[in-house]
Amino acid sequence: MGRLFGTDGVRGVANADLTAELALGLSVAAAHVLAEAGTFEGHRPVAVVGRDPRASGEFLEAAVVAGLASAGVDVLRVGVLPTPAVAYLTGALGADLGVMLSASHNAMPDNGIKFFARGGHKLADELEDRIEQTYRAHASGEPWDRPTGAGVGRVRDYDQGFDNYVAHLIGVLPNRLDGLKVVIDGAHGAAARVSPEAFARAGAEVVTIGTEPDGLNINHECGSTHLAKLRAAVVEHGADLGVAHDGDADRCLAVDAKGDEVDGDQILAVLGLAMRDAGSLRKNTIVATVMSNLGFKLAMEREGIDLVQTAVGDRYVLEEMKANGFALGGEQSGHVIVLDHATTGDGTLTGLMLAARVAATGRSLAELAGVMERLPQVLVNVRDVDKSRVATSEELAEAVKTAELELGATGRVLLRSSGTEPLVRVMVEAADIEQARAIAQRLADVVKSALG
């Protein structure tokens, strides 16, 4: 059996891979591991639990709450809120643990569990490993040490979470958004209420799409993975820009007034320059991943900003930021971390800060994003292969070497196994889009034959 925890918690098809029993067991295990680590010492432990609107989140939330309370943890149930809201509230309320139920941008049948440590930071890999080991030991029959009587956890709804989080977002903005018209695509997800409310309170005129979650329509042909409707709405309403979130709103992609996409690299470039000008870009450095477009790297070099690159996954970006005191980092996919104001990617905060830069400069989003030129980049997802052998296949290594020689200094190749889905990602960057497509497809075919 493979590792339960991926790069972003535990994910799978709800009620098939991710069952109520697994959710309950992992929650109990998390409580025990954190207790053993001394997190709860000297006080009664408290956890914040939130979820996105997926139908399966209802029973999984019940399982998580039951598991925590049975292990002696008091639970503050905040309901449907973005992942970064749960992280923020975990820190702001002084909770010992946060739990978010979401599968982010994945399709509705999936769900996931993500744990936050005290302060709202993601758990270290070592703690996740211990939670998994503890869960497996007890799933095999080892009995739990269970509190009784007054020792069991108490559960209550924390209805102030929405307003507390929105007030936090507004409080950290450098300037208001008066005069801007913004279209928000909430992906029928966790940001459906939060993001429009925050933009409106900041002064923007707000048009909404994808803000009517029914538990089944999350991410369906909307949000940051499906920008067509947002593009059309921005043009139709004559908006200054549009922002799109994913299901749990820890990411943000944007659309300019012409309906053209502004991706995570461009957003990082715009915010990086804004923070540099404001004197808040610590050590004059942005942290990004190896998936960032080469055009982003070249633009930052031209602007005199240093770039540090990590493995793919916002947790690794965050680890690098925390270890070296950097203030801004993110991914091309729209996970952007502004560490002075958030402990994880925050799609609503990102959108607000992007809009604030447009309002402050009086320049269009297209002009601001034009600081970098995206080189053509082709990404092919190869499914139904053994992703664990990506790094050890000699056939694959030889194919990559051949592709790199063909590209020379004008492009690059990146192969990686997904941390959240059962597939291998093939990325090829080149000055010519047709060359990138041809090489990417050729490598995808090799992945299929070598790892299939």
Image (spheres, grey):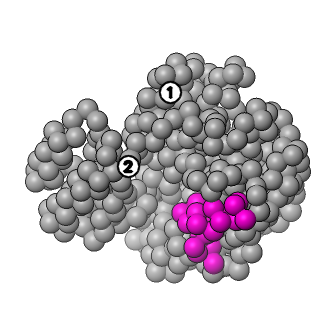
Q: How far across and how far down the image is residue 402, in percent? A: 13, 45
Q: Position of residue 392 (x, y in %)?
A: 17, 50
Which residue is at a point 30% across and 65% down the rendered structure image? Answer: 382
Q: Secondary structure at mark 1?
A: helix
State whether the magenta stretch is mostly helix, strand or loop: helix
> Which of the numbered marks, if any, corresponds to residue 377?
2
Amino acid found under the numbered disc labelled 2: Gln
User: Can I make out residue 2 in this image?
Assistant: no
Q: Using the image, tell me which numbered label, if any, was put on residue 164.
A: none
Magenta span covers which residues?
Answer: 217-236
Q: Residues within 10 Å of mark 2 (few under 14, many from 20)?
A: many
The residue type indicated by label 1 comes to Met
Sequence order check, earlier mark of 2 and 1: 1
- Residue 300, numbered label: 1
Establish if 167 lies above or below 104. Answer: above
- Quarter of the image where the C terminus is located: bottom left
The span from disc 2 to disc 1 (Cα, nearest Å) is 18 Å
| Image spot of residue 156 (x, y percent) | 82, 66
